[in-house]
Amino acid sequence: MRKAKGWMIMFLCSFLGLTACGGGNSGELAYEQITAKEAKAIMDAEKDYIIIDARTEEEFAEGHIAGAILIPEYEIAERAEMELPDKNALILVYCRSGRRSKIASEALVKLGYTNVKEFGGIIDWPYELVK
């Protein structure tokens, strides 16, 4: 019994120590990941938001969400501060499958943007597109 209690205490201490670290994200600003449905609800309810399409120009031309601004994920660092001057603006970010939108969202947060919501890829967008 005493051995089991000692093991349990060691386990709990280790677990608490790991969770206290927060997986390396504790205390850091981060973007919020939301669903396409949540993004659509924001677009329907809010007036002041920016939609970033983090794909290529060719992908954008094939179809995009109405009102989206094309800033490919590899250009975010150079273009964001000039094209997105309000670092507190609500920014919704998507790409094709969700990989590049995550990269773009992380870059925006590193640049000081405080209200970034990433909603994955256009392949999961069940709503209307502009072509």
Image: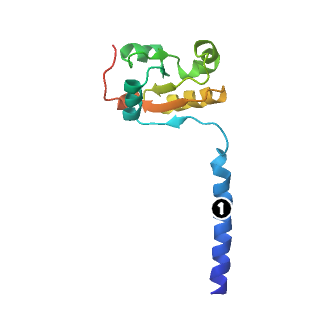
Q: Amino acid at mark 1?
A: Leu
Q: Residue at x 48, y 26 (%)?
A: 92
Residue 3, how many percent across, how many down? 66, 83
Residue 71, how many percent across, how many down? 53, 17
Residue that label 1 marks: 16
Residue 63 higher or lower than 32, as above or below: above
Question: Which of 93/58 is in front?
Answer: 93
Name the element at disc 1: helix
Q: Residue at x 64, y 50 (%)?
A: 22
Q: Is residue 126 left or right of residue 89?
A: left
Q: Residue at x 64, y 68 (%)?
A: 12
Question: Which of 123/68 is in front?
Answer: 68
In which quadrant is the N terminus drawn?
Answer: bottom right
Residue 68, how many percent across, how many down? 44, 17
Q: Quadrant of residue 109?
A: top right
Disc 1: CA contacts within 10 A as few (<14), some (14-19) or many (>=20): few
In which quadrant is the C terminus drawn?
Answer: top left
